[in-house]
Structure formats: structure tokens, C-alpha cells
Image (cartoon, helix red, strand yellow):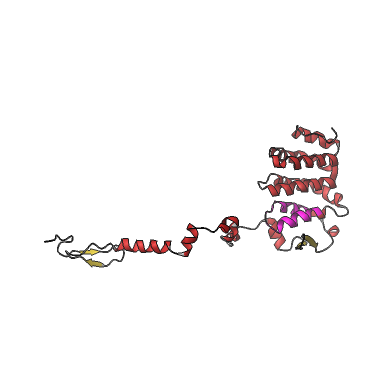
Amino acid sequence: MQKSECPGGLQLRNRVTGNYLQRTSSSTPVRQGTTIQQSKSSSSIGSPESAKKLHPRPSDKLNPKTINPFGEQTRAPSAFSAIYSKGGIPCRLVHGSVKHRLHWDCPPENLPFDPLLITLAEGLRETKHPYTFVSKEGFRELLLVKGAPEKAIPLLPRLIPVLKAALVHSDDEVFERGLCALVQLSVIVGPSLNDHLKHLLTSLSKRLMDKKFKEPITSALQKLEHHGGGGSLIIIKSKIPTYCSICS
């Protein structure tokens, strides 16, 4: 006679459902908990969501933003983007078929440089469109207006730390925008920039170690020397001894 696994028809309580199961001497042990877990795991593996996780599309790697288009909305907006969204920047991006341009709400020469020029300089650290274009182009166009030197020179003590923040930024494109803005500023303010150069040259010296930046930085230093006069050369050589003067 076959020996019963549950002598006397012992009642077992199922841990998952809380119900009592009757086992007889001829019955096979029932493992409902294992069955339920297996069914759940098998259904999850076969679901479309799990298939995407196991087999991501190539486009997900090429364009990560398509994975979660709403994920970045939780981040607080930058100061420049917040000001731009509220209409604090008196210009807007106009998309063109060949190139973009800015449309100013009023002639730039009628706008006060304080704090607009500083705000645009802060926007150089942006990494998203349209803020990158608006800040870079707006800074350039504002420095081209009549009377720009007289308006920009008094702002240098506040402009230099902002430009330095762009020059030490880890993003290469942000650094390039900061370097371009520095050269544009030197064209307008000339030797007045010399007293502030030492605060910017350290970051340029570090980037010189990167081969891809050696040529643009050298070109920028030559323009700084050209517009800054003999006094700028002494300052540049003190921070970057390997620099070769345009006069040599």
C-alpha cells in the first residue's frame, strides 16, 4: 500500500491565498505559490514592455530623448531660459531655411547694456536650442551697436566672472562660445580688458593641453594681444610662457 505524504488527510494552509487545501494519500503535492510566481514571471517576460527592455531599438541609443521625452521636465529651468521664457530677452529666434537670425523687439542700440549684456553672457553656458543661438548671437550683435565701448567697459568687473564660467565649463561647445565671446569683447573694449585677463588665462592654459583646442586658443590669444596692445603680451606670457607673440 502506498504511503501517504499527508497522513490522515492533513489540511495544509496555502501561504499565498490563505485557503486550506486537502491532501489525500494518493494526491500529488500542490505548490500553488510556485505556480503563481511562474505565471507572473512568464507573463512579464512576454509583455511588450519587457521586450523593449531586453531588445532596445537602435534609435534609442542614437536619440536617447525618445526614450523618456518627459524626464527632463523635472529639472529646474536655468536662469537664462527662465528669463527668456518670460520675455526678459528683447529678441526672438527667427528660423530660416538656410540660417537663423534674431529679431529684436526694438533697435539694439536703444537697449541698456546693464543687465542685458551680462544676461546674454550667462546664456553662453546653455546647452539647448534656442538658448544657445540666442545668447551667442545676441551677445555678438549687442556689441556691434554704436556706443558699445562706453556701455561695455563699466560692466567688465561683472562680465569677466560670467565669461570665466563658460571657459571652465566641461562642455566643449560652451567653451568655444565663451572663447568667441571673449575675442568679440576684446575688439570692443581694447586695452581695458588687460586688467582682467589674468582671471581668464588659467582656464585657457589648461585647454591648450587638448590638441583640438590648441589652434583656436592660439588664434584667440593673438587677437587679445592685437587689441590689448603691449600690456596684454606681458600678461599672456606670465600665464602661458609658451605663447609666441604675433610680433616675433
Residue 191 percent coordinates (x, y): 85, 41
Dominant SS in magenta: helix
Specify whether residue 131 is painted magenta: yes
Q: Residue at position x 70%, y 42% from top?
A: 212
Residue bounds of the magenta highlight = 116-140
Quadrant location, the N terminus: bottom left
Quadrant housing residue 129: bottom right
Q: Residue at x 80, y 62 (%)?
A: 103
Quadrant where the C terminus sits is top right
How far across and down, in percent of the image, does residue 9 sit? 17, 65
Q: Is residue 44 magenta?
A: no
Residue situated in front as seen by the camera: 156 or 174? 174
Q: Position of residue 85 (x, y in %)?
A: 70, 62
Furthest residue to the right?
146
Q: Is residue 247 above or below residue 50?
A: above
In the image, what residue occupies the spot 49% across and 58% down?
53
Task: Reply above or below: 221 against 48.
Answer: above
**Is residue 212 depicted above or below 114 in this figure?**
above
Q: How many marks?
A: 0
Q: Nearer the viewer, residue 26 or 13?
A: 26
Choose top left, top right, bottom left or bottom right for residue 247.
top right
Q: Position of residue 80 (x, y in %)?
A: 70, 56
Q: Which of 61 and 182 lies nearest the eye of the viewer? A: 61
